[in-house]
Amino acid sequence: MAGGNWTHVSEFILMSFSSLPTEIQSLLFLTFLIIYLITLTGNSLIILVTLADPMLHSPMYFFLRNLSCLEIGFNLVIVPKMLGTLLARDMTISFLGCVTQMYFFFFFGVAECFLLATMAYDRYVAICNPLHYPVIMNQRTRTKLAIASWFPGFPVATVQTTWIFSFPFCGTNKVNHFFCDSPPVLRLVCADTALFEIYAIVGTILVVMIPCLLILCSYTHIAITILKIPSSKGKHKAFSTCSSHLLVVSLFYLSSSLTYFRPKSNNSPESKKMLSLSYTVMTPMLNPIIYSLRNNEVKNALSRTFRKAFGHRTYFS
């Protein structure tokens, strides 16, 4: 669009849920606030309990702490601004604020994809090579795996965010979403974005499909190993250590894949908002609940931690 009406955009307007009646927006604010508080509390408890309880100092809970840190970061990037648009009706976000929000959204999202694959590998080693598990997943190895999971978020977020905001914007500055996501921001660009869209598709395949294939490969070997266990009790115990992770993986990958395989898909903006809510708001809340309810070690550790806390309070009172 050479010679078009390009404008210097200093801020964007997040349309969020402005099309809904005021009463519905107030109800959404209360709902999302409760979910937000549950998310922060639940993931913070997971971090504190797995650090405080010596019984949870295994590699599995080390990676779970990393996942909880990612979920907290994910929520802090998106939800406070969304709550502000619902409560104060302040839908503006500065250019730099939009850039920052998109950058950290991609960073945490990509890191979570690879961390979930790392957690699947951890379960593979624990079930398929139990005798060598302490040696293979020693402290140095799991630290390296955690760093390797977090690192891909930096280059992906840097390239994607820098590329999008290097385009010229024209006309409206209204982002039809509740945060600065790439597809709705890309619609405001008045330039040829075909090359970027190709990059986005390839990037999605690499970031989503490769970890997903690693997870499938790990769980294929795990399933084969579990089927070879003679006792039903042994099979149930082995499966129970994987069930929580499988639920989390299913929730995250299904919704994110449906949203990002096509940056300018024909899906309506409202349906994309609902899909985005599932992995930006709901999944981070459900993860600590899933791991707490389906894991006896976490439940017992939470019980021990609360008993100690209330015991000390009673003692000092």
Image: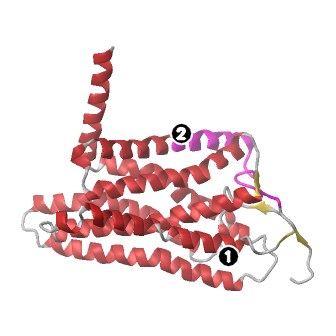
Residue 265 left/right relative to 216: right
Alpha carbons under labels 1 and 2: distance apart = 32 Å
Q: Residue at x 23, y 44 (%)?
A: 54
What's under tag 1, amino acid-wise? Lys
Q: Is residue 85 above or below residue 160?
A: above
Amino acid identity at mark 2: Ile
Q: Nearer the viewer, residue 92 or 253?
A: 92
Position above or below: 200 against 185 = below
Quarter-wise, where is residue 274 in the image? bottom right
Give the residue displayed 93% in from the left and 82% down from the top: 3
Residue 246 percent coordinates (x, y): 34, 63
Q: Which residue is mark 2?
A: 34
Q: Residue 59, image x and y in percent?
A: 27, 58
Which residue is disc 1 drawn over? 264
Q: Dot 1: within a 10 Å radius of its alpha carbon, few (fewer than 14), some, or many (20 or more) residues?
A: some
Residue 84 at x, y percent in the picture: 69, 44
The colour scheme applied to this rendered structure is secondary structure
